[in-house]
Amino acid sequence: MADKTAAPSARSWNATRLPDLSGRTAVVTGANSGIGFAAADALAGAGAHVVFAVRDLERGRAAAARVTGSTEVRRLDLADLTSVRAFAASWDRPLDLLINNAGVMMVPEQRTEDGFEMQFGTNHLGHFVLTNLLLPYVTDRVVTVSSGAHRMGDRVIHFENPNLTGIYTPQRAYSQSKLANLLFTLELQRRLTGSGSPVRALAAHPGWAATNLQSRIANPVARAALRLGNRFLAQDDKAGALPTLYAAGQDLPGASYVGPDGLGEMRGAPTLVGRNAAASDPEAARRLWTLSEELTGVRWGLAASAR
């Protein structure tokens, strides 16, 4: 499937046009800063009870204190599957919205607590486990934040070497993890549809949003260039959160992908956007799901008992 805009943009759409979310519950990973905080703030403002799922409880509580609305803070470290399982095991009520937002970007080569390459392990595998374990409670939709970077790098999942041992570069790893987010969404929706579930899986990307995510990039030259871009070219975090909120609040088909409608999908109003052929490959999506099950031990249909 070629990259193309799949639907007209909603130019006047903003967070104030979210539906009334009173009585609904949302979990937002990485809600303490950036587009995660902006999304959590908007969801709470629309009446939802928002759970800040964060690695640092102190920072999470400070962020939640800035929000007007119903919130709570729970610890979640996506780079540690023991933490992910503990978060899921403590969950005991319906969950309307799961926003898989947290991530790391182009960091130096390192491993998660479970030995996975950090970006693949955090951005994809951590959310894969979290989603599967919480899925018995999800009533509406799962929104996973990807990136235009899925079009960069090798444009493949390195199935035989997902840790990129011997071939690691920060950009290759980040691109692989963001491609994985889209393939995960595609296969999750296929499985939900096949099981007769009304839950929808969607993906979104923020375009170029000025957040602290870029501050951890390994290459100092790239980090400096992105710092300048953040200052002069990027959207702010509130604008960057709009595709996530659009995916969370609009009546969209499962497996939809939302991003900005501007040049290169870098900024603009949220709209349905296309994805490249690699992110539209159902066989790659199924293969990634199988690999993720093998790596994590969490399997479709067994998620509730796996907790």
Image: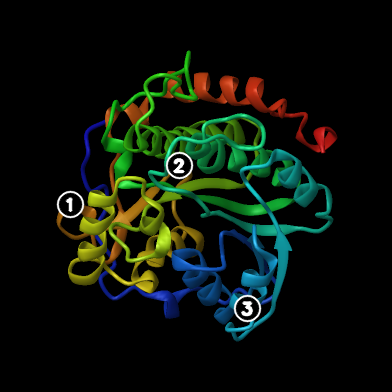
Please report whichever mark, 3 or 1, sits nearer to the chain's N-terminal start.
Answer: 3
Q: Is residue 191 left or right of residue 170?
A: right
Q: Which mark is residue 18?
A: none
Q: Is residue 146 left or right of residue 117?
A: left
Q: CA distance from mark 2 to mark 3?
A: 34 Å
Above or below 245: residue 223: above
Q: Is residue 269 left or right of residue 42?
A: left
Q: CA distance from mark 1 to mark 2?
A: 21 Å
Q: Label 3, secondary structure: give it.
A: helix
Above or below 238: residue 122: above
Please report whichever mark, 2 or 3, sits nearer to the chain's N-terminal start.
Answer: 3
Decide which of 103, 182 is in the foreground and name it. 103
Look at mark 3 in the image and give the residue it sits on: 62
Residue that appears at 29% across and 57% down: 207
- Estimate how packed mark 3 is, as few (under 14), some (14 to 19) or many (20 or more) residues with alpha carbons within 10 Å: few
The scheme the figure's colours follow is: rainbow
Amino acid carrying mark 1 in the image: Gly
Look at mark 2 in the image and give the residue it sits on: 255
- Estimate how packed mark 1 is, as few (under 14), some (14 to 19) or many (20 or more) residues with alpha carbons within 10 Å: few
Decide which of 260, 172 is in the foreground and name it. 172
Look at mark 1 in the image and give the residue it sits on: 264
Tell me whether the residue at label 1 lies in contact with that at label 2, contact meaning CB atoms closer than 8 angstroms. Answer: no
Q: Residue farthest to the front?
A: 220
**Mark in front: 1 vs 2:** 1
Tell me whether the residue at label 2 lies in contact with that at label 3, contact meaning CB atoms closer than 8 angstroms. Answer: no
Percent position (x, y) of residue 75?
72, 59
Decide which of 39, 250 is in the foreground and name it. 39
Above or below 279: residue 62: below
Amino acid carrying mark 2 in the image: Ala
Q: Label 2, secondary structure: give it.
A: loop
Percent position (x, y) of residue 12?
29, 76
Decide which of 51, 215 is in the foreground and name it. 215
